Image: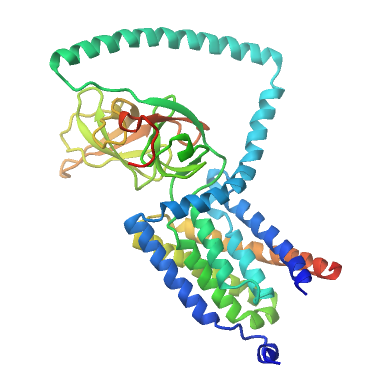
Amino acid sequence: MVSSQSNRNPARIPALGFRALALVVLSILLMWLDHRENHLDAVRRTIGAAVYPIQIIVDTPARIWSWAKEISTGNNQLQLENSRLRTEALITRGRTQELAALKAENDRLRAMLDAREQVRGEVRVAEIMAVDANPYRHNIVLGVGSTDGVYDGQAIVDASGVVGQVIEAGLHTSQAILISDPDHTLPVVVNRNGLRTVVFGTGEYNRLDLPFLANNADIRPGDLLVTSGLGGAFPSGYPVAVVETVTRVPQEPFADVTAVPAAALDQVREVMLIWTSAHEDGDTDE
Amino acid sequence: MSNSRAHQNVPVLITILVAFMLMIMPLPGGIESFRPDWLALMLIFWAMTVPRSYSVGIAWLLGIVLDVAQGTMLGQHALALCVIIYITVKFHLLMRVFPLSQLAATVFALLALYQFLLFWTNGVAGVSASAVDYWGPVVTGTLIWPILSMFLSGMRYRVQSRG
């Protein structure tokens, strides 16, 4: 028999070393292409679509749990919640009217100043899937993808502040980075005095860093930081964080400033995606 | 022959699917860093038991899928899995006759190498993470190995005796 050789020596797997070496070289090539050139979006999307069913299955228990909780809440509690929500809606509606007036006034003033008109983007609510992403980063997986018009770099906020931005829009799901990721930076302004700076993630959900503020900068605990819109990804004016501590060491050039994110980064289940004017059509291809 | 092979493939595919789910299943913040590398463990077991069918090619493909599912660099997990499965297949006869303690030590070394490769590629790409993110899975993976391998061999035996 021709194949008897391999039968006699079962330890030998034909061309194992060669195959392993080829695959290792291929992996390195892929990593280089992916990291340096970002050429592999199509590949990612295709495989991502195949992974989608698994993600759905993993997400299902959490979905059922919240659904069951909703069903099992008593009538009494529902009524309570309903009345609370109704008051909340009333207050919000009142504020919105105020906002409309303010916006009109703002537009008028801007027109008088000949400033470029600011366009508020479209928003849409998206659900965070109960699926863990990259273990080395603060990433989340959203249940919407490029078929819903999501694009790379899109801003994500929740009811109280900025959450993060999309880093990879797949077909039906997308990966997003939180502002607390150590690799995430965000241009902000201090709401009180318009001081511009950059906020860095620290890897902790409840702390952000502001490393580039001079020792004599006008900043104090309690200051609200809002997006400046300078980075291009975020529309301006969304709350990001509140300054917590300001430590000034006399001989250091920079003050040591930390802030607490306005959004509850580790608790949110639903977030809002913002479509800025450049992407209004929901096109993914630039 | 081909029919019995197909029979053999089903449990393997199921375990791999389950491994995938366990890899992306949400865990509470504190123990997230201690998630065992389920896919690596399953692949080590199957590469040790049936090295002809489950070798570096499959490991590489699954690594790519894991990269997509976790949003890591494409090829990162593929590279790490490919290398440790190569070593496993190379020494599978030896590993089969190892006593449990020695096998556990081998698995520990393989998982440490796996995490080192991830650490190394992360470093080249400039992704920083704390040491516990790398050592946690190695420790829990080694601890869970005896139970997992007992369970998997029981499952394999049952399937074979039925087929």
State which quadrant residue A62 falls in.
top right
Q: Residue A195 appears at what percent x and percent y?
A: 19, 29
Q: Residue A153 appears at what percent x and percent y?
A: 36, 40
State which quadrant residue B39 falls in.
bottom right
Left or right placement of residue A220 versus residue A242 in this view: left
State which quadrant residue A100 falls in.
top left
Left or right placement of residue A161 versus residue B3 in this view: left
Tell me, yes or no, if residue A136 can be seen here. no
Nearer the observer, B54 or A250: B54
Which residue, as the protein is rendered here, is positioned at the far left?
A113
Left or right placement of residue A253 versus residue A221 in this view: left
Q: Residue A249 appears at what percent x and percent y?
A: 20, 41
Which residue, as the protein is rendered here, is positioned at the far right?
B162
Tell me, yes or no, if residue A17 can be seen here. yes
Q: Quadrant of the N terminus of chain A?
A: bottom right
Nearer the observer, A228 or A201: A228
**Residue at 73% across / 65% down in the picture?**
B152
What is the tally of numbered marks visible in this picture?
0
